[in-house]
Image (tube, helix red, strand yellow):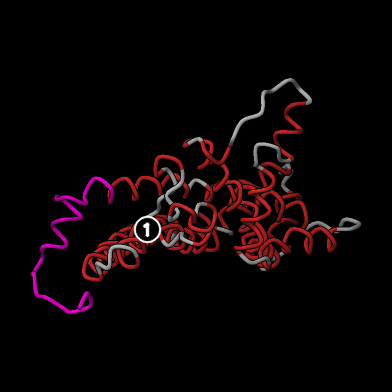
Amino acid sequence: NIWQAEWIGFENYYNILFGVYSGEFYKSILNTLILMIQLPVSMFLSLVLAVALNRRLVGAGFFRVVYYIPSLVTSVVVVLIFQNLFDTNGVINSFLSLFGVEKTSWLSVPGRASVVIIALSVWKNIGGTLLMYMAGLQGIEGEYYEAARLDGAGGAVIFWKITLPLLQPMTFYLLITGIIGGFQAFNEPFLMYQYNYGFGPESSTETVMVFMYYQYSNNSMMGLASAISWVLAAIIFVITAIQFAYNRHKDKEVN
């Protein structure tokens, strides 16, 4: 019976940290961190868009809805869209060929495959992050801006000295939840390369969650998958604790 439990102590933890599975485990960690580049990119773009759309401009409400729509689309649909966009004969290659760029297979080249997943994640996540920043901006009292303008402060000074510091709690929240979500990345890399279990070219898109799922579903190693989940939980806990400690230190400096 493949599901019969057998006590082996800490052998699974040793195997993923130092033993036979350590190489693949650490590579999956690195892949996860690389794909997490989408977090600062999406946060930066969302902040820029939020500041622009927070003004009373004609059509601002329409663009808020447009930017949020990708957040409502399911992962399966998003993956299908980007598979068609970055296919050898897809829209991206067709556009680049107009400038003399030779067509390439984005989905089968390690570095470019990661770029596709990052672009997909940015496009899908930017709407939710934009909405959070909009809420943060609308919570800032207008008196701060009026006082700054009376003192002769320009737009750039107001942004760096007022807007950005007052958005720090929101940025901190988005950073923590983004990192936790980044370590849990599964749907997009798995669905994009489901024909080889989400590994992608040369296992370049095999995240920790994909690696754990593969050990559980294909190798029937429930104990190993459980050990991976506990190690992943410990990593997230340590990173979150460091972030909270840093945030408390910054708050003390301000006060």
- Magenta span has 27? no
Instruction: State left or right for residue 44 relative to residue 223.
Output: right
Q: How many numbered marks have been drawn onto this rendered protein structure?
A: 1
Q: What residue lies at 72% left-to-right and 51% top-to-bottom?
A: 49
Instruction: Decide: is 5 above or below 253.
Output: below
Q: Residue furthest top?
A: 100
The single residue placed furthest to the right in the displayed view is: 58
Q: Position of residue 196 (x, y in %)?
A: 44, 52
* Residue linked to disc 1: 243
Q: Secondary structure at mark 1?
A: helix
**Does 6 sit above or below residue 201?**
below
Q: Quadrant of the N terminus?
A: bottom left
Give the amino acid at mark 1.
Gln
Position of the C terminus by quadrant:
bottom left
- At label 1, counting other C-alpha atoms closer than 10 Å, the crowd grade (few under 14, some 14-19, many 20 or more) is some
Q: Residue at x 46, y 62 (%)?
A: 181
In reply to whether residue 17 is colored magenta, the answer given is yes
The image position of residue 63, as x and y in percent, is 81, 58
Instruction: Look at the image and give the residue range highlighted in magenta.
Output: 1-24
Outermost residue on the front side: it is: 1
Q: Where does residue 104 sit, x and y in percent of width and height?
A: 61, 30
Residue 127, quarter of picture = bottom right
Q: Is residue 247 left or right of residue 235?
A: right
Between 244 and 49, the residue placed more toward the observer is: 49
Q: Nearer the viewer, residue 246 or 158?
A: 246
- Quarter of the image for residue 247 reads bottom left
Locate residue 238, reporting x and y percent.
29, 60
